[in-house]
Amino acid sequence: MNQGQSKVDIMTETKTHIYKCLKCGKDIEMDINTTKKVICRYCGYRILEKRRPKTKKRVEAR
Ligand SMILES: [Zn+2]
């Protein structure tokens, strides 16, 4: 079973969304490819606010 290379293709697009639990206020990162229902993994609350995905925002530090 040795074929020399074990090549793992990880080029599949991962769509991750950030949700914020409205109960405990934690940010939950969800992979929508594997997750169908959105539930807080900390407290189990089901109402989560969808946030924007990670964007590179330039903030000037003074
Ligand atoms: Zn929660």
Image (cartoon, grey):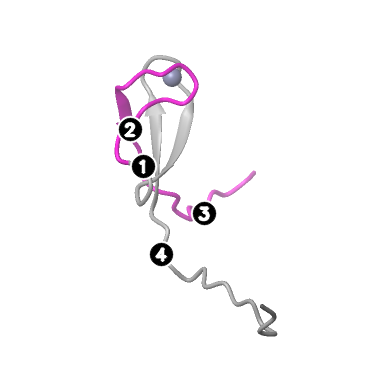
Mark 4 burial class by Cα count in 10 Å: few <14, some 14-19, many 20+ = few
Instruction: Look at the image and give the residue range highlighted in magenta.
Output: 36-62
Which residue was labeled with disc 3?
Answer: 58
Mark 1 burial class by Cα count in 10 Å: few <14, some 14-19, many 20+ = few
Q: Earlier in the sequence, mark 1 or mark 3?
A: 1
Which residue was labeled with disc 4?
Answer: 13
Of badges 2 and 3, the one in the foreground is 2
Q: For this rendering, which residue is in front, 21 or 62? A: 21
Q: How many marks?
A: 4
Mark 2 burial class by Cα count in 10 Å: few <14, some 14-19, many 20+ = some
Q: Tell me the distance, in whole angstroms, between the alpha carbons under discs 1 and 3.
A: 30 Å
Which residue was labeled with disc 1?
Answer: 35
Q: Tell me the distance, in whole angstroms, between the alpha carbons under discs 3 and 4.
A: 25 Å
On the image, the x and y values in percent for residue 58 come to 52, 54
| Kind of residue at badge 3 | Arg
Query: Residue 38's mark?
Result: 2
